[in-house]
Amino acid sequence: MFFSLCFLLSTSLTEMSNYLSPTISPGSSRSTQQSFIASQSTRLLILMQTNRADKDDPERKPRIILIERGKTRRFMNAPEVLQGLDWFGFEVVKADPRIDSNLDEFVRLVDSCDAIMGVHGAGLTNMVFLRSGAVLVHIVPYGIEFMADGFYGAPARDMGLRHVQYSISPDESTLLEKYGWNHTVIKDPEAIRNSGWEKVGEFYMSAQDVVLNMTRFGSSLLKAIELIM
Ligand SMILES: *[C@@H]1O[C@H](CO)[C@@H](O)[C@H](O)[C@H]1NC(C)=O
Ligand SMILES: *[C@@H]1O[C@H](CO)[C@@H](O)[C@H](O)[C@H]1NC(C)=O
């Protein structure tokens, strides 16, 4: 049973690696990538078998609550994000905190999750309802990496949560389409930052949405799964 599971998992992962490539050096070949993924997945499977958080229910998938934002810093490819999370074996709970008016119910919902995921913003403060040891998967839009840890990373660690930070590349930001590679907004976020908080707000906080590259993001999800188990 165990070995056939291993086989199935590494076979489907080999398939997946056609578009999934975790952080390995750019020059590495396809087969190196495949064996990297296969070795990662086998390691994870062994962890799953031996060290499950929920031993009473071995079938239980890791649960992740996905925080969606309303107006800015949204996921432009939400269906693909959901599909990717499903592929990685997560049970996804969707939440828009503004409309979940029943606080009691919402708190219970978050508390039942192993991880919370969302783009940098107020919705992530719902991490206070997670149990300790749970994981914050924190997606950082382009140009605001400098404040990512201070706002959510450090507080998460202080609460006994684990923090997985994923900073998007320009090609995962709607800013690239708007400004192009040669504009200061893309080329030199530090210059924008030096010109004042207002500019950071104007460009990076209120005018940017995210197109998450699930291939690149995959290694962050693997890290989260490892921390959950
Ligand atoms: C960006 O700038 C370089 C040189 O500074 C130029 O060769 C290139 O055509 C520019 N690209 C765009 C898209 O404007
Ligand atoms: C996503 O990221 C991978 C790995 O970095 C890259 O090879 C691929 O071109 C990216 N996909 C898109 C649509 O940009």
Image (cartoon, rainbow, N blue to C red):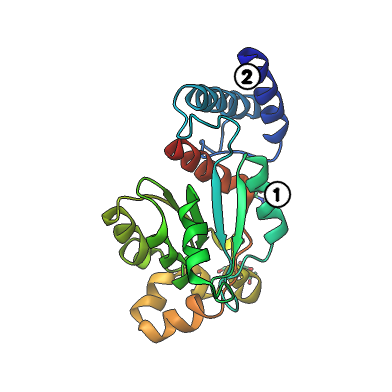
Quick one: 102 or 64, which is closer to the camera? Answer: 102
- Asked which secondary structure carries label 2, the reply is helix
Reply above or below: 162 against 103.
Answer: above
Residue 79: x %, y % from top left: 72, 57
Quick one: 137 or 184, which is closer to the camera? Answer: 137
Compared across the picture, whether 23 is left or right of 21 comes to: left
Residue 226: x %, y % from top left: 46, 35
Residue carrying label 1: 83
Reply above or below: 97 against 93.
Answer: below
Compared across the picture, whether 26 is left or right of 14 comes to: left
Q: Earlier in the sequence, mark 2 or mark 1?
A: 2
Q: Residue at x 52, y 61 (%)?
A: 118
Q: Which labelled disc corresponds to residue 115? A: none
Residue 211: x %, y % from top left: 64, 62
Q: Look at the numbered disc 1 and say if its residue's Cβ is closer than 8 Å to ligand 2.
A: no
Q: Quadrant of the C terminus?
A: top left
Q: Give, as a three-letter code, the residue at label 2.
A: Cys
Reply above or below: 224 against 213.
Answer: above
Q: Residue at x 36, y 63 (%)?
A: 152
Compared across the picture, whether 159 is left or right of 83 comes to: left
What separation in Å lies between label 2 and label 1 (alpha carbons)? 22 Å
Residue 142 visible within the image: no
Q: Quadrant of the N terminus?
A: top right
Q: Give, as a three-letter code, the residue at label 1.
A: Gln
Q: Which labelled disc corresponds to residue 6? A: 2
Residue 197 visible within the image: yes
- Kindly indicate the quadrant of the structure image that contains residue 87: top right
Quick one: 50 or 79, which is closer to the camera? Answer: 50
Residue 15: x %, y % from top left: 73, 31
